[in-house]
Image (cartoon, grey):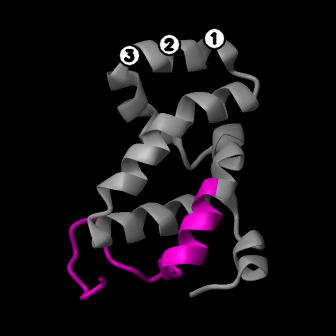
Amino acid sequence: MTDRPELERLSSAELHDRATRLAWRRLDVSFLWHLLSTIPEARAAAGEEDRSEIDIMRPLALLNDLVDADRGELADALRPLYIDYLEKHGDGDAAGGEPGDDEGDD
């Protein structure tokens, strides 16, 4: 486990990369779905209300947003989600593997 203060020091992009890499390694569909479903709320919190309404109505837009979820105000709005996940499940170490790599994570 990684402690919260250590995670708080990371950039939003680094948190996104670590959390999503760890979720892919763990095949944690639940977290990835939660991330996708949280993106419209995070967009609204980041001041992008128009875009968040589009996301809710078009699931494909959510998948496109997943690609952008490591950038700008959206990434900053999603920081608590990434930090909570990494704190609970591990650090998703910076050197970690690519999605689909099986490194023995439970």
Label 2's element? helix
Q: Are marks 3 and 2 in contact (CB under 8 Å)?
A: yes
x and y percentages locating residue 87 in the rendered image: 60, 76
In this rendered view, identify the residue nearer to me: 101 or 104.
Answer: 104
x and y percentages locating residue 59 in the rendered image: 35, 23
Task: Establish if 92 lies above or below 30.
Answer: below
What kind of residue is marked 3?
A: Arg
x and y percentages locating residue 81 in the rendered image: 61, 55
Please report the bounds of the magenta region as a residue range: 81-106
Residue 65 belongs to the span the image colors magenta: no
What kind of residue is marked 2?
A: Ile
Q: Is residue 102 left or right of residue 93?
A: left
x and y percentages locating residue 68 in the rendered image: 50, 40
Quadrant (top left/top right/bottom left/bottom right) for the C terminus: bottom left
* Residue ID for mark 3: 58
Q: Residue at x 54, y 66 (%)?
A: 85
Quadrant (top left/top right/bottom left/bottom right) for the N terminus: bottom right
What kind of residue is marked 1?
A: Asp
* Residue ID for mark 2: 54
* Residue ID for mark 1: 50
Q: Are marks 1 and 2 in contact (CB under 8 Å)?
A: yes
Q: Main secondary structure of the magenta part?
A: loop
